[in-house]
Amino acid sequence: MFTSSTSIRKRGRPPKKALPSSEGVLHLKFVESNTLVSSENQDVSYCGSFNWRPYLRKQGFTAAPVSCFKHVALSNCWDSIVENVRVEVRSPDCKGPNCNCTTNPCRYWLATVIKVCGYWGLLRYDGFDKITPKYFNVPDKWVNLCTEPHIHPIGWCAKNGKLLVPPKSIEPKIICWRDFLMEMLPGGRTLPPDFTFRIEEHSHNSIKKDMRLEVVDKNLISVVRSAVVTDVVGGRLHIKYSECGEEEEDEGFWCHERSPLIHPVGWAQIIGHALKASPEYARLSLKKTLYRTFEPDDATWDMFLPVYNPIGNLKFKKKMKLEAIDPLNLSAICVATVTEVLRNNYLMIGIDGMMAANGADCFCYHASSPCIFPVGFCESNGIKLTPPKGYKTEFKWSEYLKKTKSEAAPVDLFQRDIPDHGFKEGMFLEAVDLMEPRLICVAYVTRVVGRLLKIHFDGWEEDYDQWCDYESPDLFPIGWCDVLGYRLEPPRVDGSEEKKKKKTVVKKRKKKALTKRATGSDDSPMILDEEAKKDDFEDSKDSFQDNSVAPDDSSSSSYQGKLRGPPRRSLTTISPPSLSNIQEGKPKLNLNKKSTPNSTPVKSILMDENSSAAPNEQKRLRSKRVTYEECPDPELDKFRTRRRRRKQKKSPEMVLDDSSSSSSGL
């Protein structure tokens, strides 16, 4: 299935997955030693390919069995080969402090495959289940049974002169290891000697690199074009169009050799499908097909799976209604119409409400395709049916057929067999994102409806889900990418929770920063609401009535507890003059100078008796409301008494501000 920007906009399809480009994909190949090496003979690690081990260790994790995938290696015999088999693997003591081996293990030991998930197996060394848990210092190990380099069938060590030595941690726990082995080995199963050959044999594809074929145009799905295979990886083909214009940029795309999107040379001419190619290619392709004169690099008809043709006179007709998976939005099953019937039971189908006038949005399905369904299929299986675009009322097939004056395709025309395929909801697998075919992603089954599966990509929204048949060649067991050396895209990590945590921390930090700023300056950016203003007024009024001025530290701490509004201006605090100055009759006033521990730091003003401004300044200071902290020194009582008497003699109508006191001329 392909994506064209115009069609996606019409369908409301989510944007493409923003993942690394295919340039970083590393392709590996098998060698005779049952190890994987890169095509450039380099030691590589798939450039960020996802590792299944964290998922395999989760409790309740399930994966689709290899036997569910008919197009992968060992699918017909996997369960009988690996279930409860014994193998010879690298000993846990190998590469220890007393081990001198480099690449090849110096010793081996027996292990049993106690669990299988896809191509992965859980190994347990023999003998560790015979001892108490406190001695169990070697845990079970998940390995890919097809790529693990040091796993062999029973008897391989004896044949190749390798040591089979029990691990030191369990050696003293078994009295006689010979009796132990004689008890465990008879009647047991092991891997077949040609296990590696069977895997490698399946990697040989019928369609080779540089072969020519015909494929659906990814930008105009109603036509096919000639193309060339540029790469092959485990049955997956990378294809580029062979006839491209000067302005057309073709990066190619991936698909499986069993995909319904590719066809042999001459297919379009024989079927009657629209072909975008030069007249010369159209003539030669038809001639090659009719006279069987194919060239060696042509993809011939025998390289493709035969299609099922129904027996009988019942056939599809033009304008018949049905339900079909939208190839441009694979999460939706839509109301569709047969727009044209081609030869060999191929159909051109369009999505109602989405079809262009020239039929550019129509696509080709065979009559036996599992992607088309009879009328009422979604309703009977509890699946949401996407009505035609612009259909406002509740969709009902009976009313729609009357309104459009059309007939429903007979149920007998559709493939209705439901085999026991083995897929269940919650099973994990590796799936191709058909809207971005180069990507193979971590996915799992969320719905099983007969032979139809709904695939959800782990970490992505439901809008990216795909409906597909259980025999789809774009589904693989877990470990397939590891076996073939193809990059497996990891699940998308939703960073919303991490962002929320970061935002919470930032908010807390900002709050503290604002608090510190508010207590240290009057230009705080905090905004006062009406209630805060009222509270601040009441606090300032109380402090004014009490005739007490708190030091800056205490006022800051009291404000810090409220966290509302800018800091209030504190009344000016004047430190009392020293006793020596009082006795000498020299009123030397020291303002905001740290002469005593209880004094508040403010601006210093020194008064000299010889200064002409001294009397006026003294009177101005007397007119201000000035208070002092209680002082334990009894010698200051006289000074306080004089100040108290002077206050009582003052007129109650006196305005206590700087302007009035300075202009009074007292």
Image (cartoon, grey):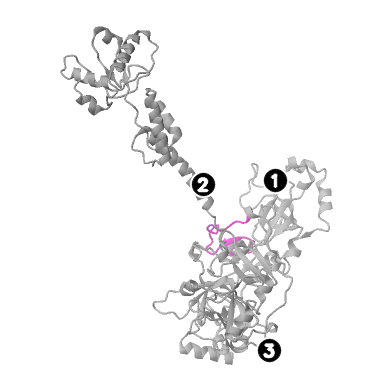
Q: Nearer the viewer, residue 71 or 622?
A: 622
Q: Residue 483's x, y, as percent?
A: 62, 63
The residue type indicated by label 3 comes to: Leu
Q: Is residue 52 magenta?
A: yes
The residues colored magenta run 29-53
Q: In the rendered image of this protein, does residue 408 appear above or below residue 439? A: below
How crowded is the residue under tag 1: few (<14 C-alpha within 10 Å), some, or many (20+)? few
Mark 2 lies on residue? 501
Residue 632 quadrant: top left
* Label ID, residue 251: none
The residue type indicated by label 1 comes to: Val
Local SS, label 1: loop
Quadrant where the N terminus sits is bottom right
Per the model, the C-alpha gap separating discs 1 and 2 is 37 Å
N-terminal label among 1 and 2 = 1
Q: In the rendered image of this protein, does residue 633 appear above or below residue 404? A: above
Per the model, the C-alpha gap separating discs 1 and 3 is 65 Å
Quadrant where the C terminus sits is top left
Q: Residue 152's x, y, as percent?
A: 71, 58
Local SS, label 2: helix
Mark 1 lies on residue? 138
Per the model, the C-alpha gap separating discs 3 and 2 is 63 Å
Q: Residue at x 51, y 46 (%)?
A: 501
N-terminal label among 3 and 2 = 3
Mark 3 lies on residue? 314
Tag in front: 1 or 3: 3
N-terminal label among 1 and 3 = 1
The residue type indicated by label 2 comes to: Lys
